[in-house]
Image (tube, rainbow, N blue to C red):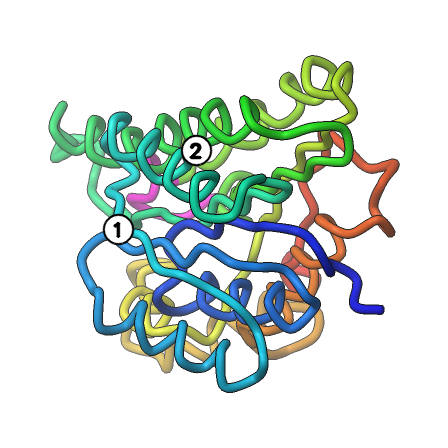
Amino acid sequence: MKKLAGKVAIVTGSSRGIGKEIAMKLAHEGAKVVVNYSRSPEKAEAVINQIQQQGGEAIAIQADMSQVDQIQELVTTAVEQYGQLDILVSNAGIEHFRKLEEITPQDFQRVFSVNVAGQLFVTQAAARYMTSGGRIVLTSSVSARISVFYHTLYAASKAAVSAMVLNLAPELGERGITINAIAPGGTATDMAQENAKRYTHPALQSAPPDALLLSKTSLQRLAQPEEIAAAVTFLVSDDASYISGSTLAVDGGRF
C-alpha cells in the first residue's frame, strides 16, 4: 500500500523546481495532487502529464499566492474536484536581494505578500476543510538562520514562516492536524542557479559560486529537488504523526 493512498494534496508553486518534485513524489505515493501555478500553464500541464504517465492522478489550478481571493478559490476548487483535502504543501515563494538603503515599501509588500501572507492564508483556507490526520507543510529556508549580504527581507519572511508553524501547532493540534515547515539549503534548481553567487560575500563573488556554497555544506554538494521532496513526503505521512510545530532543516549540514 502506498503511503498516501486515498489522500488529496495541494502543492503551491509546483510547476517547476522543488514544488514540481514534491507534487510528483506525493502522486507517486498515491495522493491525488493539485498542481498550482501562477503564470506558466504549459509547465503545470507538463507536470500533470508526467504524473499521469507514472499512473498518478493530478489537476492544475492557477492561483497567485499574493492574492487572498485566488488562494481561497484554489482551495475550494480542489475540494469541489476531489471532495476532500488532506495535505497542503505551501511551496510558492519569491527571492529578494537588495541593500538596506535600497529596500522600498513595495519590495516589502511583494516579498511578504507571497512568502508570509500567502502561506498564512493558504493554511487558513486549507485548514477549514481538513479533518483529524490533516497535514500542512510550509516552506521556510536556511536563510532564516544564516547571515547573507542584502538578504534581509527574504530571510525575515522565512523566519516568520517558522514562527507561524510553531504558534499554529497547538491551535491545529486540537483538531488532530499537524503543521511543520521545511528549511531547504542550496538546491539544484533554476532559481538557485540564478542566485547562487549572491549567497557569498561581495568580495568573493568572482570565485566560482558552487565552490563557495559547497565549502559551507557538510555534505559538500547541493541538494537535489527530489531530496527535498522526500523530506516533505515524510512530514505529510503517518510516519510523522507526532511531529508538529517544527522546522526541519534539509540543508546538507549547512554551517
Compared with residue 206, is residue 80 higher up or lower down, i.e. above or below?
above
Earlier along the polypeptide chain: callout 2 or callout 1? 1
Left or right of residue 49, residue 6 in this image: right
Q: Residue at x 22, y 32 (%)?
A: 100
- Residue 200 visible to an observer of this rendering: no
Q: Residue at x 43, y 33 (%)?
A: 119
**Magenta residue check for 151:** yes
How far across and down, in percent of the image, does residue 219 sit? 70, 74
According to the picture, the residue beneath numbered tag 1 turns out to be 62
> What's the residue type where badge 1 is placed?
Gln
Question: In terms of secondary structure, what is the magenta stretch mainly?
Answer: loop
**Magenta residue check for 12:** no
Question: What label sits on residue 119 in the rendered view?
Answer: 2
Mark 2–mark 1 Cα distance, whole angstroms, equals: 16 Å
Q: Residue at x 48, y 39 (%)?
A: 79
Question: Which sits in the foreground, 16 or 200?
Answer: 16
Question: Which sits in the foreground, 136 or 113?
Answer: 136
Q: Quadrant of the C terminus?
A: bottom right
Mark 2: which secondary structure?
helix
> What's the residue type where badge 2 is placed?
Gln
Q: Quadrant of residue 16?
A: bottom left
Q: Report the magenta residues as a range.
A: 146-154
Q: Residue at x 35, y 47 (%)?
A: 93
How far across and down, in percent of the image, does residue 194 sit? 27, 70
Q: Quadrant of residue 246?
A: top right
Circle 1 Cα neighbour tier, 10 Å, few/some/many (<14 / 14–19 / ≥20) = many
How far across and down, in percent of the image, does residue 94 sit? 30, 48
Compared with residue 250, is residue 189 higher up or lower down, i.e. above or below?
below
Compared with residue 112, is residue 231 higher up or lower down, i.e. above or below?
below
